[in-house]
Amino acid sequence: MINLFKCGARNAVFMLDPEVAHGLTVKGIASGLMPRARHAVDDRLAVTAAGLSFANPLGVAAGLDKNGEAIDGLVKLGFGHVEVGTVTPRPQPGNPKPRLFRLVKDEAVINRMGFNNDGHAALAARLEKRKRHGVIGVNIGANKTSEDRIADYVAGIDLFSPLADYLTVNISSPNTPGLRDLQAREQLAKLLDAVADAREKAAVRLPVFLKIAPDLTEAGLDDIIAEIAGSTLDGVIVANTTLSRNGLTDEKQAGESGGLSGAPLFERSTALLARMRQRLGPDMVIIGVGGVSTGERALEKSAPVPTWCRSIPVWSMRGRS
Ligand SMILES: Cc1cc2nc3c(=O)[nH]c(=O)nc-3n(C[C@H](O)[C@H](O)[C@H](O)COP(=O)(O)O)c2cc1C
């Protein structure tokens, strides 16, 4: 696995503005000129979770390919699943630039993109056009100016159920004001009821995962666990970016607002993963995300706690550009 913070190509890539580098990365992968994965996937890496068959447990997390432009290229690179989005019903520009910052020494990134995306219709058209292969998830969210956020999630479930293999309900981005409030118990209960209802009515019944933040208080964690346990959700994605700035050395960039990802998120997100596994039991699907930059780090995600309660090993990473 390439760690861009350490590999030789990094100097060239790091001369570019981070968001420009991100855009070029997506375009490059979308061009189809990327090499195919060099090795055949070992059958022993195959994982079945939530009724889905993954060729291998390492996937791409939401945020790299928000608009589903590079899905086929990402599958060709060998990822076991590709999660596109977050997508909102209406297209929106996101926050003013600059909104993506590299913390090179910390092997981290801070972003406050704010769900910049082309909207439901554009992503649906791209998904309709492609020949289906690979496990593809659509990560759904709410527009910044939405008057009914729950309705935005329901619209995502209606539209993308026939077009994807799983759906992720993202309530954990720190960059849409008030979005994380949906993690509070009463709001979450309403949201999960609406999601369950929409999923039952949809043309195709897909697995639904909930993506949570790594910054939960004890009480907040208790609330989420109680709601998840009483819901029909198929799994939890742990976790989104953090608001914490603990342990950073790049003081200038650390002052930027937004969510922190990369190496400094590894411990926090893996500790939360372990707690979720202990609290939710061995059968709940948990997808570990945060600071996965090497094969070893990926493996640590599946064994953060004793063997008896290991997580089902499915992880996601975001390529850092
Ligand atoms: C630039 C950028 C954009 C992101 N956009 C989204 C998003 O739209 N939806 C989402 O659920 N997570 C988003 N994320 C969070 C990632 O999916 C992931 O949870 C987080 O970056 C931690 O993983 P990492 O340390 O491997 O990067 C974004 C992250 C970054 C850096």
Image: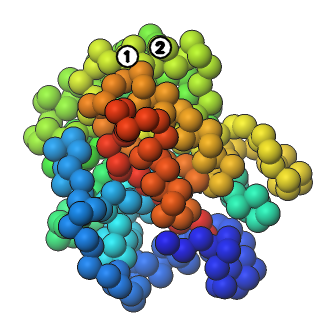
Residue lying farthest to the front in this orientation: 307
Name which residue lies at 62% across and 38% down.
268
Tell me, yes or no, if residue 235 can be seen here.
no
State if disc 2 and disc 1 touch (CB < 8 Å): yes
- Between 319 and 37, the residue placed more toward the observer is 37
Q: Quadrant of residue 276?
A: top left
Is 21 above or below relative to 257?
below
Figure disc tally: 2
Secondary structure of the residue carrying tag 1 is helix
Q: Quadrant of the C terminus?
A: bottom right
Between marks 1 and 2, how big is the CA–CA gap?
6 Å
Residue at 78%, 40% in the rendered image: 246
Q: What residue did someone put label 2 on? A: 223
Residue at the farthest left position: 203
Q: What residue do we see at 62% from left, 43% from top? A: 267
User: Which residue in the structure is indicated by mark 1?
Assistant: 227
Residue 18, percent from left and from top? 68, 68
